[in-house]
Image (tube, coloured by chain):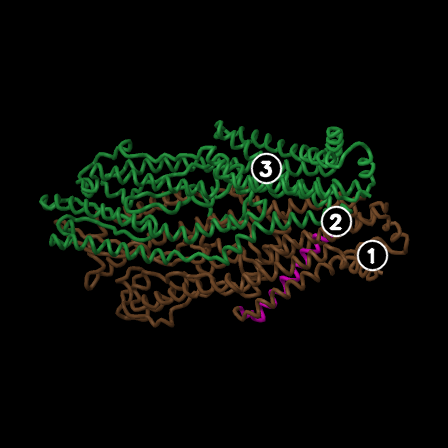
Chain colours: A brown, B green
Amino acid sequence: MIWCIAKREILDNLTRFRFVLTLILAMVLMVMNAVIFVSSQYPRRIAEYSEDTRKAVESLEKKSSNLGELAVKGPGNLYKSVSPLTFIATGKDANLPKRVEGASSGGYGIGMTTPDFSFNYSWSANWWLQYPQDTFRKNDSLPNFTELDWTFIIGLIMSFMAILFTYDAISGERETGTLSLLMSNSVSRATVLLGKFIGAFITILIPLFIGILLNLMVVSASRLVSLSGEEWARVGIIFVISALYISIFLWLGLFISSQFSNSSSSLLVLLLIWIVFVVLIPNTMGVLASGFKQVPSRSEMSRTKKAQEEEIDTRHKEGDKLYQTGSPSDTPPKTAVLRMWADYLNEHADAKGRLEDEHLNKQFAQIEFTQQITRLSPAAIYKYAVESLAGTGFARHKRFIQHARRYRQQFVDFIQSEDRGDNESYHVYLVKEGLSQKPVAFNSIPKFSDKLTLDIAFKGAVLDLTLLVLLSLLLFIAAVLGFIRSEVK
Amino acid sequence: MLWTIVRREITANILSFRFLMGLLIYFSLIVTNLFVLTRGYEDRLQSYRTAIRENEDKISQVQRYSQFGLTHLLKCDRSPKLLSIFNEGVDKRKGNTVTVAHGYVPAVAEQHGSDNPYLNIFSSIDFTVICQVVMSLLALLFAYDAISREKEAGTLRLALSGAVSRPTLLLGKYIAGMVSISLPLIASFVAGLLVIQFSPYVSFSSSDWGRILLIFLVSMLYVSLFFLIGLFLSTRTDRPSITLMFSMCVWVLFVLIVPNLTVLLVEHASPTQSEESYKEQARDQWKQYGAEVKDYLENRSVEKPLDRASFGGVGVNSGVNDYDSGETVSVSGFRGEEGVPFAQECYGFKENLRAQYADRIWQIRKTYLDKNPNRQSLLALNISRISPAAVYYNAAAILAETDLGSFWRFMEQTRQYRREWLDYMRDEEIFSARRWFTTEFEESFDLSRIPKFKEQSEGIGSSLQRATLDIMILAVLNVLFFMGAFISFLRYDVV
């Protein structure tokens, strides 16, 4: 019986204008997305990424001629890899920084002659991890509302279409009087509802499926992007999530439709719900959240930084003790001097690194808080789920930062273990003269890698996926109960 | 007769379910949004004031004039625009503090205040956007069944069989619809103004009131356009449900898809060159500058203006990136006073030359900016005018002084200010002053002596002039659709 109703619904829908419209929109937008992606977006980003990494490797290679120098200067720029699935969810990646920098900045020199001693040393500060705001986006005058990706096409347009497919499913039949006819047969209300759902679900999935197929065809025909098996699996999961997301709106449509006796009222209510939850909530929360959770301002930051640095300076330079015993550049240097200077330089680098890390963590906490609030909107939940699977967006960026921080430790460990292998070294970490001056085999330096496995991606999406399932279930129950309790006429 | 129809329609509209729902949703959205944006404005105003105070503090600490070139740069701050509460435009995006130096012509603005750059991944919505999205939808919902429903119900025939002519009926429906829609609009404006007035930081000037009124009128024009589109579509079909479907498609296309798509298309079809191309040239210019300075010194057979060994100075060289140009020299513990006059002469030459090179680099940069990001932005703006929603937003932004043009105006003012500053430095012969490089002057710097940056806001007349194109587009579209609806209704099959 369900199939009978579903078939009727499908046949009915297929001849409707809204089906044609959905088909056209899905096809045009999906193809457009793919064409833009393969013709300019992706190649440009990949080119920039490979150029950047090439430069980074080059500069690392240059530094590897001297272990001490490498230890001081740090690993250089670490770049975030570009996900080939950016066309599914751009995740506003263009607005997120593309790199972190493990480098030192600033060089200093001190020369002084007093009656007691003479001191001369020039050095550059030890490296620490910095987070520059360096993005792909070139022109910040262009408005940044949304981007044309799957999350836009499905999250916004298809959810709208899902509403158009269901708003009159029950209220329309009430209006024309066919509902009482239908119910006079020996069908249960749940069956009718399920039949209608399946009918609408299939008819909306057809255009979506065609659109996605075209999209993937263009993407894979370009040969620019060759998706691996794992990435195909992700695309598959994303499709399932998309279907789940659409079903939420279908159930919502059926639920509201069952509560009204005329179809324009049900459409009106649905539209308003849709506007609030899909358009407005995801877009207003950014401003709102920034008011709730404050982040220290930049000038505050630089004040704290300055104060800490001054504190370190006064503590170490008290009574010129840093200069009296000798300079690290003496030949041969005294180990005590090296240790003193290493302490001094390390403290500086640690303080700067710690401050920047904390500041970034606070900024991230604010973003996560905002994301939590936006989860009021199913469109936002859907977007986050898809982003985790596509390897884009904020969650991905956070993981990249974590990788970079892990790599920082790896790099330090490498320098120390390499240094232990050199008998001529003083083994004082970290002042340039205190470490081995031998060249390092470039290949042995650990390289930064920023790979994301399906496993991790899926774990990141679990929360949002659960939320979507719950929401869908909730609306399903609401629709069934609502329909059972409603009048036929 | 017209008024009977208008009255009937207004009563029917106001009592309808959609009116109540629309009013409720729209109203709550606007009030929360305005509340949030007012808070945001207060924050920005505060950080603007702090920034100005901090800058003045910093400048008053200048001991050597050369510090103006690198460590104690002058700043121009852009005040947050009060009407950004209604329309954010580029106000938050484009930065609001600009660095000025004799060796650097300002071209970009930085952000002061407690901003979190990662918040950029969230898009934000202001009063105008809510109006753009919700009011247009509401207008369509009011208009879609104005004609076709009456036909379906059979009342259209009845109405027209009396003494009512078709134009009167259409006009009556239009006026009534507009009155009903303008109610929530007016209510939201009033509520918004109340919310804003509660803030202790805000006081409206008469020109602000004028701008608000203009924004309101533009909003009305925009809403009216969508009402007419709905009316037009309603006269094209027999069934309200079909009209509704078409209206929704028009709405999705013009309000949601087109404004977003144009940005994307322009970004990809007409990309900008990377800044590297200009930076390369700038670097060459600085190299040339270095060579000229070297020549100058060689001609006088000295290696450095001040021999570091005998004076003990520290210098930092100029670079190509924003804000790191100029050179701070600090000289203490003279061992020979005889070198000083020459050093003065030398710095006088060097810094004047640096200012000239900065101007030259600015010319290069200007060409780059005009050919790349600025051209792209203008292109995106022009293409997005396909959508009335974008036209409306742009008009409102111009009136709120938050559009790109206002920002460019501000940047131009900062460059003007740099000229003044440079002229002042040259008049006072600051470059060749002894205080340029020596640490012997202890007293702090007197701020009142230097020219101060004053931001000149645009007059309401000139704003209106710039907004004319967009307002005209809206007006013309209004007329077109009214005529369309009119003609179509004259030929409408009543039965």
Give the camera-side residue of A147 and B148: B148
Relative to A113, does residue B208 appear above or below in the rendering?
Answer: above
- Crowd tier of the residue under label 2, counting other residues whose Cα lies within 10 Å: few below 14, some 14–19, many 20 or above: some
Our reading of the magenta stretch's main secondary structure is helix
Residue positioned 21% across, 39% down in the render: B430
Residue type highlighted by circle 3: Ser
Q: Is residue B145 shown to the viewer in this render?
A: yes
Numbered badge on residue B219: 3
Compute the Cα span from label 2 to label 1.
Answer: 29 Å
- Crowd tier of the residue under label 3, counting other residues whose Cα lies within 10 Å: few below 14, some 14–19, many 20 or above: many
Same chain assignment for discs 2 and 1: no
Q: Chain of mark 1?
A: A
- Crowd tier of the residue under label 1, counting other residues whose Cα lies within 10 Å: few below 14, some 14–19, many 20 or above: some
Q: Magenta stretch containing residue B7, yes or no?
A: no
Provide the residue designation for mark 1: A191
Provide the residue designation for mark 2: B242
Residue A266 in the figure: left or right of residue B102: right
Q: Which residues are magenta?
A: A225-251
Can you tell which of label 1 and label 3 is closer to the viewer? Answer: 3
Per the image, label 3 sits on a secondary structure element best described as helix
Residue contact between numbered discs 1 and 3, judged by CB atoms under 8 Å: no
Residue type highlighted by circle 2: Ile
Per the image, label 1 sits on a secondary structure element best described as helix
Q: Quadrant of the C terminus of chain A?
A: top right
| Image x and y of residue B375, in percent | 44, 51
Residue A243 in the figure: left or right of residue B120: right
Residue A454 in the figure: left or right of residue B76: right
| Image x and y of residue B212, in percent | 54, 32
Q: Chain of mark 2?
A: B
